[in-house]
Amino acid sequence: MGVEVVCTVGSAHKIATIVSKTGLAEERIIVRNQPSFRKQLRSTLNAIKADHEGFDVIMESLGGSYLTDCYEEMARNGRLGLRLTLSDFIMQKN
């Protein structure tokens, strides 16, 4: 299939676990809780895709600014998978 996988984690201490459990190279793992998250997405994409078009498939479960950053780095005609929970639909009226 020619699939290139990139993973995001919430903190750097999770990188070793991902590497040991999946065999994914450390440079394919991005720590998302950093101001340079979008820049890291672009940099990783540039390293694995010569055409720099964008990610073909993104599985997103966090929402917020992460969703926006991922969406902005998605290829034209790319696919975005969302995992929504009940809390995503609850709104508080002030």
Image: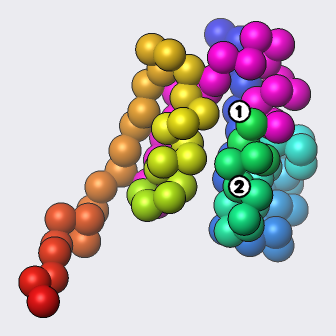
- Seen in the picture, residue 51 relative to 83 is either above or below; the reply is above
Question: What is the x, y in percent for residue 35?
Answer: 72, 65
- Seen in the picture, residue 85 relative to 29 is either above or below; the reply is below
Question: What is the x, y in percent for residue 22?
Answer: 77, 45
Looking at the image, residue 32 sits to the left or right of residue 76; the answer is: right
**Pointer 1 residue:** 5
| Magenta stretch holds residue 52 | yes
Number of the label disc, if any, that sits on residue 44: none
- Choose between 85 and 72: the one closer to the eye: 72
| Magenta stretch holds residue 79 | no
Residue sitting at x 55%, y 29%:
74
The quarter holding residue 24 reads: top right
Quadrant for the N terminus, please. top right
**SS class of the residue under badge 2?**
helix
**Pointer 2 residue:** 37
Looking at the image, residue 66 sits to the left or right of residue 50; the answer is: left
Residue 21 appears in view? no
Q: Which residues are magenta?
A: 43-62
Question: What is the x, y in percent for residue 88?
Answer: 26, 65
- Seen in the picture, residue 30 relative to 74 is either above or below; the reply is below
Question: What is the x, y in percent for residue 34?
Answer: 73, 67
